[in-house]
Amino acid sequence: MSSQTWLTQEAADRLRSELDHLTNEARVDVVRKIEAARAEGDLKENCGYHAAREEQGKIEARIKQLIHMLDNAHIGTPPASADGLVGAGMIVTADIAGDESKFLLGSREISSGDLDVYSEKSPLGAAVLGAKIGDTVSFKAPSGKEITVVIKSVENY
């Protein structure tokens, strides 16, 4: 499968809005905080200055992450699940180690929060990616335990 992130139009719009806010209002606000803290004097023991610089770093990291994600995103509808194959942007119902679970395969950014989300690069995501209804796959959990997954159904998000 491709390394692109699949996003709904709604998710892409939400991310663009966040990016706009961070690159404009949030950057200006944090620069004001840094300037105000600098004006207080000694920067070595200035907690306000260090907190503002940390906040600035987090904002810049999130901006980079959003730009990368949006530049590499496939925006639109996920591929049809008519063939029953598990792919990005699909809701998968599976029996995982004896318990039925329903989750979204893709990016957390596309979820409205009502489902667990697993990346295609996660151990579970990599195991089920490309599987079809009725397939049994397995993956190794971080603990080293082998976990068996049976695909029950696949539907578009």
Image: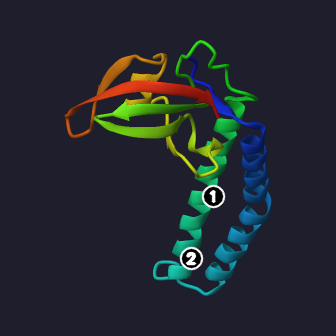
According to the image, label 1 marks what residue? Answer: 59
Q: Quadrant of residue 91?
A: top right
**Depth check: 84 or 47 in front?**
84
Ranked by sequence position, the earlier of labels 1 and 2 is 2
Q: Is residue 122 visible?
A: no
Q: Is residue 5 visible?
A: yes
- Label 2 sits on a secondary structure element that is helix
- Residue furthest toward the bottom? 40
Horizontal and vertical percent position of residue 12: 74, 41
Query: What amino acid is at disc 2?
Result: Tyr
Local crowd size for mark 2, using a 10 Å CA cut-off: few (<14), some (14–19), many (≥20): many
Rendered residue at 48%/33% (across/down): 93
Rendered residue at 50%/81% (across/down): 47
| Marks 1/2: CA–CA distance | 15 Å
Horizontal and vertical percent position of residue 21: 77, 58
Horizontal and vertical percent position of residue 23: 75, 55
Rendered residue at 54%/16% (across/down): 85
